[in-house]
Amino acid sequence: MKLADKVRLAGVVGAGGGGFPTHVKLGAKAEVVIANGAECEPLLHKDAVTMEESAAEMVRGMQLAIEAVGAREGVVGVKAKKKRAVEAAQAACKGTNVRVQLLGDYYPAGDEYDLVYNVTGKLIPPGGIPIAVGAVVNNVETFVNIARANVGVPLTHKMLTIAGAVKSPCTLRVPIGTTFRQCVEAAGGLDTNDPVLCIGGLMMGSTSDDLDLPVTKTTTGIIILPRTHHTIERKLKPAKQQAAIGKSACDQCRYCTEFCPRFLLGYAVEPHQVMRTLAFTGAGEDYFSQWAAMCCSCGLCTLYSCPEELFPKEACDDAKAVMRAKQIKWTGPMNPKVHAMADGRRVPIKTLAKKLHVLDYDLPAPYLRQDISPGRLVLPLKQSAGTPCLAKVNAGDRVGAGQVIGEPAPNALGAILHAPMAGAVREVNEKQIILER
């Protein structure tokens, strides 16, 4: 059986947050396979811990992928400051066609466009994906899961970091479907009376105050901060208010554009132009929306660059939504050229953490060697890019650990869902399956 088929049957998806079904990437032909271990979201450590704990499996997964796509080599991109992870990865790479490439400690070093350029020296065409320049990129944890899928082990558990306002920040591996509340308990409990969760990180994550949401295949971590924290207050500001403030206050200083990582790589991303659309309608909106087309939503413009604390990232998100709704395609320049000041304008993680007012929370989050075995799991039927799964079980069914409980429709993009534990199916609806031990 081909590796892509084994990976599909194991339900493996991108573990870095994107959730693209991994078997699709393994069906391509490429020159280089890249493991993304940059992990540039402040306070998150799960990728570093994954390398520290499972470097040999990661490299094995890369070797399997290299063979599957016909690549000449593999490259592990990891920040030089993650010394234990670097040492583990370098040791695992010895005698293989995989090497380690050290990255700087800046945000967002993990953006695929930036990582591919650093590794290959090639710029992905505007609007393109890494395979356009002969690269296949996956998160380091995804490669661990590829190695496990090769020997018939399905994806049922997830590595994630619990940090911020908790008593003992940690990184742990839990069954998919475990609630955030149970993860926080493993981290010693909350250190605030009014918690807000940044799911996936402070910069690109979503916000919620629901501790009973489940860990999914794409959860990288949760950062918990008090509701009164300045960064949380900004994130919770209603969208209409964000736009109204931007319409009245943006003075077109260009800082959002001049610090934009994609702009510095040479792509036509200009958030300050998108901010102008807050005052325009009709044709103006259509035209200026295009300046957001290649925005990667890293959040640097909103949470770091803007001196007035406006919301250019959110304006870009809205502009991209307009383009999708109106089927507007990028018609601008297709020949990016790296900006002369690209290196000088990179934002160090410590500087970013200071701007976010989280230096006090910037603590180690060591691996917690504790068996987390919840009695109840909430398993969303959509945990990847593409379509949701169709439930393959009914309420009252008994299932075994690793059993298939959901599948995408035939020929649809998606990922198979497996039971992380043996138990009874208590509820099935169009959105989720609830499994009890």
Image (cartoon, grey):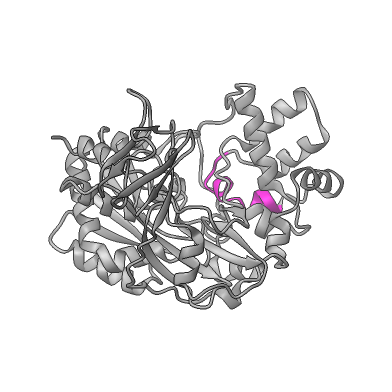
Residue 210, by quadrant, is bottom right
Left/right placement of residue 251 relative to residue 432 reads right
Left/right placement of residue 211 relative to residue 69 reads right
On the rendered image, what quadrant is the N terminus found in?
Answer: top left
Q: Is residue 409 above or below residue 209?
A: above
Q: Is residue 399 above or below residue 104?
A: above
> Which residues are the magenta region?
255-267
Left/right placement of residue 22 relative to residue 123 reads left
Q: Nearer the viewer, residue 90 or 159?
A: 159
Q: Is residue 290 visible?
A: no
Q: Residue at x 58, y 27 (%)?
A: 330
Q: Is residue 53 visible?
A: yes
Q: Residue at x 41, y 68 (%)?
A: 171
User: Residue 339 location, x and y as percent?
Assistant: 55, 49
User: Residue 19 location, x and y as percent?
Assistant: 41, 43
Q: Nearer the viewer, residue 369 or 358?
A: 369
User: Residue 365 location, x and y as percent?
Assistant: 44, 73
On the rendered image, what quadrant is the C terminus found in?
Answer: bottom left
Residue 259, by quadrant, is bottom right
Left/right placement of residue 85 relative to residue 261 reads left
Magenta-span inclusion, residue 226: no
Q: Residue at x 55, y 40 (%)?
A: 267
Q: Main secondary structure of the magenta part?
A: helix
User: Residue 286 location, x and y as percent?
Assistant: 70, 26
Farthest residue in the right direction?
248
